[in-house]
Amino acid sequence: MPQPDRDASADRAWRAEVANGELRVDGQTYDLAGVTSARIVEVPTAATGPILMGVTGFVFLAAAAGDFGPAGLPVGLGFLAGAVLWWRAKKPQFQLRLETPSGEICPIEDPDRDAVAAVLREIGDPPAAT
């Protein structure tokens, strides 16, 4: 039996709606009248964790080659494998940034660029500040 079509927004942690010059994200309302520009910005994820894990793996491998004995070999390889998997699993976050005369607002952050772009398309080109 075929599954019914699901709304893709059901998988997101946030829900956005644009109506009457306002952006509503999870109950928070942002007035679009004062917005001078809207754009998507990629926020890279931190690399500190995977790098430290990889360095730890190399330390265990070096110790296994030295006086520590062969017990460090599987531990070192495990740390290196974990570091590689962690590095590959990292995903950048995409923010919707709304610029106003009083500063920047980032109402949405999501790893799915298309979802953030859909909200940006709904907002359209905000009017220039006067």
Image (cartoon, helix red, strand yellow):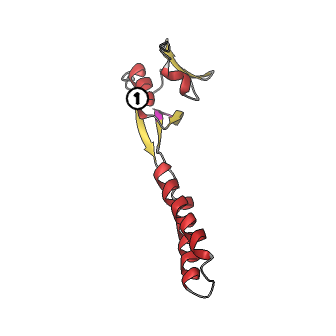
The residue under label 1 is: 117
Q: Residue at point 41% right, 19% down? A: 122
Specify whether 27 is left or right of 55.
Answer: right
Q: Amino acid at mark 1?
A: Ala
- Locate residue 17, reporting x and y percent: 52, 17
Residue depicted at 50% across the width and 50% down the height: 45
Residue occupying the point 50% across, 17% down: 6
Does residue 92 appear left or right of residue 128 in this picture? right
Q: Residue furthest front?
A: 1
The part of the image, by quadrant, that contains residue 119 is: top left
The residue lying toward the viewer, choosing from 65 and 5, is 65
Q: Position of residue 34 (x, y in %)?
A: 48, 25
Seen as rendered, the residue at the extreme bottom is: 67
Nearest to the observer: residue 113 or residue 73: 73
Q: Residue at x 40, y 29 (%)?
A: 117
| Magenta stretch, overall SS | strand
10 Å crowding of disc 1: few (<14), some (14-19), many (20+)? some
**60 is higher (above) or lower (below) than 52:** below
Depth check: give the residue in front, 70 or 23.
Answer: 70
Q: Secondary structure at mark 1?
A: helix
- Magenta extent: 96-102
Number of marks: 1
Side of 129 relative to 1 (left or right): left
Is residue 16 something that shows in the picture? Answer: yes
The spot of residue 5 in percent (x, y) is 47, 14
Residue 36 in view, yes or no: no
Is 105 inside the magenta-drawn segment? no
Q: In the figure, 92 relative to 59: above or below?
A: above
**In the rendering, at what x and y percent does residue 21 appear?**
48, 15
* Rendered view: 18 above or below 81: above
Quarter containing the C terminus: top left
